[in-house]
Image (cartoon, helix red, strand yellow):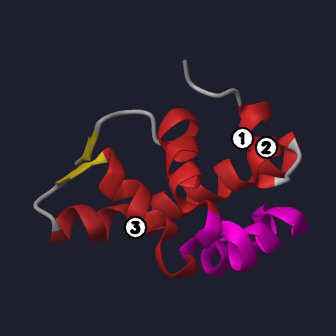
Amino acid sequence: MKPSQADYAQQFALTLEDLASLKRAALATWQVIAYDCLEATGSNMKQDEVIEVVLDADYIVSNHPKMLTPAAKQFLLQRASEHYPQLCRYMADYVFTVSRYGM
């Protein structure tokens, strides 16, 4: 059974509102980078690859800082690396939920 969003929020020491802002900003970030990523990879990417590129290089914070609550932004900048496996699992469970993405 997958953890609830409340379970993830507790693991990350965030509120559900913080987690929702993270989800919105991650989806918006994918919208910005998707075309280039899909074009570079032959127009098809697996779920874990999408999650990796969205979380890579602070794309979420640099592309959509105003979408994030202050706590979510701080989490991404200062603590996400120590929770990376759980953050990827959250993204797979609640944000990027299909197995393949393509054009």
What's the residue type where badge 3 is placed? Answer: Val
Q: Tell me the CA gap for discs 3 and 1.
A: 21 Å
Q: Describe residue 55's horizontal placement relative to residue 71 as left or right.
A: left
Q: Is 63 placed above or below 21 here?
A: below
| Mark 3 in CB contact with mark 1 (< 8 angstroms) | no
Q: Quadrant of the N terminus?
A: top right
Q: Describe residue 72's horizontal placement relative to residue 52 as left or right.
A: right
Residue under label 1, please give it.
8
Residue under label 2, please give it.
9
Q: Quadrant of residue 17?
A: top right
Q: Is 79 placed above or below 43 here?
A: below
Query: Counting residues from the N terminus, which is met first, the one under dot 3 or under dot 1?
Result: 1
What's the residue type where badge 1 is placed? Answer: Tyr
The magenta stretch spans residue 79: yes
**Residue at the left extreme of this rendering:** 42
What number is the disc on residue 53?
3
What's the residue type where badge 2 is placed? Answer: Ala
